Every structure is written in C-alpha cells, then in structure tokens.
Image (cartoon, rainbow, N blue to C red):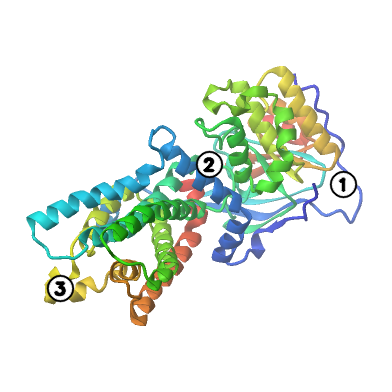
Amino acid sequence: MQYPQEIYDSSRRPHPLVEELLSLIKYRELVYQFTSRSITARYKRSIIGVAWTMLNPLMTMVVLTLVFSQLFKWNVPYYPVYVLSGLIVWGFFSHTTSAAMGEMIWSGGLLNRIYVPKSVFAVSAIGTGLVNLGLSLIPLLLIALILGIRFNPALLVLPFSVLLLSIFSLGVGLMLATAAVYFADMIPVYEVILTIWMYATPIIYPVEIVPPQLLWLFRLNPLLYLLQTFRDPIYKGVIPGWDVWAIAAAFALAAFLAGGLIFTSKSNEYAYRI
Amino acid sequence: MHTAFKPLPAQIDSEDQKPIITFEHVGVLYRVPKERVSGIKEYTVRWLQRRLSYEEFWALKDISFEVFPGEVFGVIGRNGAGKSTMLKVMARVLHPTRGRVVMRGRVAPLLELGAGFHPELTGRENIYLNSSLLGYTRKEVDRLFDSILEFAEIGDFIEAPLRTYSTGMVARLGFAVATCVRPDILLVDEVLSVGDSRFQEKCLARMNSFQAQGTTIVIVSHNMETIKNFCSRALWLDQGQAGAIGSVSEVVASYTG
C-alpha cells in the first residue's frame, strides 16, 4: 500500500482549529468506532436493548403527566407531547455534553501516548446522542398521533433544529472538556449546573407560569430558543419565526467557535495534565 | 536473546539525503500549578486571593539532532530524563514550546502493546478499534485484516472477547495491528520484552525487514544493553538536556563515565 509522504513540521502548523478539523476528517473511522462502541456497550447486557432509549423518556413523561395534570391542574393541552419533546432535547444536551467531558478524561492514558484528534470524544458523543434522539422520536411521534396531533409540513424543519442543537452541544462539550482537564471536580460541579439549568428551562412546565419580572432572565438561556425550534413544529405544528432561528443559530455558532478555539488552544497541555 | 536483530549500517553517505527526523533547539515547557489545586471551587478562591502560582519545568532543553532514513537511533536516559517527552514530541502528542521538529513520513508508535484495546470487545472489533486509533480508514483495515490475523496467530479466538485472551495473545495482536503497514518511522518504547521468545523473534524479524526497506527506528530505553544491541547511533538524555549524541560506543562511554 502506498501512502503519500506525510510531513509534520512543528513550525508550519495550520491554525489549531483548522488542524483539528482536518485531523477529524482523517480519523473519521475513529468517530464511527467510538460512537458504535458506546451504543452497543450500553445495551450489550440488557434484554430489551435499544428499546431502553425509547422507554426512558417515555416513563419520565408518564410520571410527569400524572403529577402535573392531577396535582397542579396545569391546563396544558397535549401535555405528554409537550413534556416529551422537551425531555428529548434536554436529554440530548445533557448527555452529549457530560459524555464529551467524561470520555476524554477517562481516555487520558491513551491520549498521553498516541496522537488522536482530541475532539474525537466530543464529536462521537454527539454521534451517540443523534442515534438516541432518532430512536426517541419514534415514541414521540406515535404519542402525538394517538393524541390526535396531525402531522404537518412544519416537521420538515426538525433536521435543522437538531443540527443547531448539535452544534451548540458540541461547543459546550468542548468547553467543559477543557475545564475538566484542569479541575478534577468539574464532573460533579456540572451535574449541579445541569439540574439548575433544567429547571430554568421550560421543559416540564409551560413558559406562561414564569413571572413576567423574571422573563428577561429566561430569555438569556440559549436552550429556550433551541428548544422552541424543535418543539413548536411538533407540538404546535408551526415553524417558529426567523428571529427565533436567528437567535438559536447565533448561540449555536458562538458556543461552537468559543468551544473549538478554547479547546484547541489548550490541547497541547492535555498530554501531560490528564 | 535479541540476536535476530542486526541493524544495517545507515546510509548517510550521500550529500543530498535529507534527515527524516530533525530536532532544532527543541524545548518543551510543562506548566503545572505549584500546589495541587484540585477543584474549581478551590481554584476560584485562590484566584480571587491571587495566590495562584505555577511551576515551570523544562522537560526538554535545547535538543538538536538529526536522524537519517534507515537508521536505528537510540535514546537513553534515567527515569525522568525526558525520554517519554521526547517520544510524545515525535508522536505529535506534544508540540515543542521552543525550536522546531520535522518528521518526514508516516510515524507509527509502538508503545505499550494493546494500549487501545477494550476488554469487552472481540478480537475482530478490537482490530478495527485499534487501527482507527492509528488513523486507518475502514477500507484500509478491511484490506489489511487477513495479514493482521495471520501475524497475530490467535486463530478462532478472533470472535471471543479480549478479556479471554492470554497476555501473549494481546501482545501479538497489538504488535500485528501497530505494524500492519510499514511506517517510515517506527517509535519503540521498551516493548520488546513481551510475549514468548518465538514471538519476540518474529517481531524482531519484522522490524528487521522494515529497516531493510528503509524504515527508521527510534528506540527509547533506560537499558544500556538494548541500546547497544540495536542501535547505530544514540542520544543520551540527562535531565532534559543532551548529555551526548553520536555513535553508540561514544554515547555509552560518556553515559557510564
């Protein structure tokens, strides 16, 4: 097998972010390997296997529906669809960002010795998240159908919504991974942040119950807009206005650029810090 | 024991031959917090109190040398002398803080064998996982698969999880994957002691044939005998600095002297 000659010159490296992207393309098989490994490893010892991905948010939905419709008497039509669509977005964000951070730290021994593009952990976390999200769309759409929500063309924007969500999560995941290299307690600290963040986002409750004087604070939350681009087409059957898309896209790009730049500028230190 | 390996004389005679590895005044700086600041809470407190100080430590200092195609180059030094930092710089895991490193060709690290293996996955799955860690695409591994299997000699165990393998089998599989394609530069980190002697002979024979075809080999060791047996030239690392560079006999003389 003939390979073109590769030359590595430490004085002629491209920008770290460019270098990382080129390297990710070359190591695409590794992204696939990590993604399929984390999907199969998760279900290898369970009898119902992949069905867990669908059952997990479903059971949470049933509990929340019972609690909130019976106890609080919230009058949210089609609440199961409302809460399930929120839980799917939240599950994607929280799992991918936590995994982006955790996988890299646990693979430290490897990173110390051989060269791999270090963002491969964050990228394959997104890959795993996308598979799980795809699977959990099945019960969501089934329930929507059963409850009488009609499918409509607005659903066609869902791929764009998921794309923005992925870009945003990747950026946040890269920032977290950088922080986790320096701070050993980053993983438990992030768990606390996630809990607060979840209750600060209208996932299980309707936006209408937010007190008007606190609305400005809620509007600072990027997930508010990202969630809206996903939930509105399913739940309301409408495509959100361009302003919502613009804000969601701006947050996603800002997170991605900040995460990518911070991550790659520090990546030289990972080799002796992890 | 290592009699199968006989380094060929390196071909440095021609004027126009470019070095395959160039180190020009290479320095690597490690910047680590002076006191162990473990968490973000503690860090914030210290940062607010401006009590955060770093220790700077040069793991490599002003190292310059060249290695030519087909050479077997040794790096010797005590623990903590900077040997593994040197390997990391060659493997692109670390970039030099100062100076310049040029590696002309495909570099294959032959580190602790089986470092990237997963115990729950089968031998077959591990071959794909491990070779993707080395940057191969699926198509390439599909093509190389049979030759890897043949070299590793693990037979029907290929479909069994790796945790059922013996140490020797893991070592064989690791070596087979790491050397499935002849690299231009092979980095060897004291791995020649694994497996039984027949397998060692086989590994050495493969390295020998690589070298005959032009592969440059860099061996890092704290063991003088290893360097004497294998290398044509060597570098002695002493606390991050080059103690001596030259023929093995010269370096051995200054290392022991």
x and y percentages locating residue A21 in the rendered image? 57, 62
* Image quarter hosting the C terminus of chain A: top left
Q: Amino acid at mark 1?
A: Ile
Instruction: Say which mark, if any, is on residue A54.
Output: none
- Which chain is disc 3 placed on? A
Q: Is residue B190 visible?
A: no
Taking the spot 69% from the left edge, 33% from the top edge, the residue there is: B176
Chain designation of label 1: B
Callout count: 3
Q: Disc 2 is attached to a residue of which chain? A: A
**Which mark lies nearer to you, 1 or 3?**
3
What's under tag 3, amino acid-wise? Leu
Q: Which residue is mark 3?
A: A214
* Secondary-structure class at tag 1: loop
Residue that badge 2 annotates: A110
Position of A142 with respect to B75 (left or right) is left
